Amino acid sequence: MKQTTLDALLRVYVKLEEIIRELYNLADDAVDRGDYDDASLLQARANILYEQMENIDVIISELGG
């Protein structure tokens, strides 16, 4: 894998990590307010992005060294 591709994947990984953390925090806030439908939606989106982040991590680990 070219270094530019590896660098791009690493940047995306970090950004996804931040977005996921924010979504989980927003879900926690929604639970605190009793907005369980919103909390469920936010958590579901975070879970999907987390899976994608894990997939990127595997690619980085396997191809990036």
Image: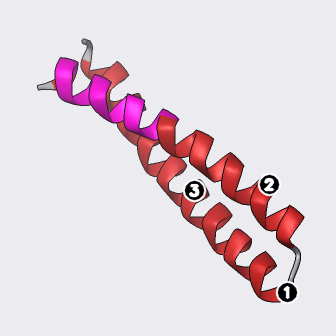
Viewed as shown, does residue 52 lie left or right of 48?
left
Q: Is residue 36 magenta?
A: no
**Residue at the spot x=26%, y=13% of the render?**
2
Disc number for residue 41: 2
Viewed as shown, does residue 27 lie left or right of 2?
right
Query: In terms of secondary structure, where does tag 1 sit?
Result: helix
**Residue at the spot x=58%, y=48% of the render?**
47
- Total labels: the figure holds 3
Placement of 42 over or under 22, stated as above or below: above
Q: CA distance from mark 3 to mark 2?
A: 13 Å
Figure quadrant of residue 33? bottom right
Q: Amino acid at mark 3?
A: Ile
What's drawn in magenta, residue-wise? Answer: 52-63
The answer to whether the residue labelled 3 contacts the one labelled 1, judged by CB atoms less than 8 Å apart, is: no
The answer to whether the residue labelled 2 contacts the one labelled 1, judged by CB atoms less than 8 Å apart, is: no
Where residue 53 sits: x, y (%)?
A: 45, 39
Q: Amino acid at mark 1?
A: Arg
Viewed as shown, does residue 5 lie left or right of 27?
left
Disc number for residue 33: 1
Query: In terms of secondary structure, where does tag 2 sit?
Result: helix
Between disc 3 and disc 2, whose residue precedes?
A: 3
Q: Main secondary structure of the magenta part?
A: helix
Between disc 2 and disc 1, whose residue precedes?
A: 1
Where residue 51 sits: x, y (%)?
A: 49, 38
Q: Nearer the viewer, mark 3 or mark 2?
A: 2
> Which residue is under mark 3?
20
Q: Quadrant of the C terminus?
A: top left
Where residue 9 sits: x, y (%)?
A: 40, 31
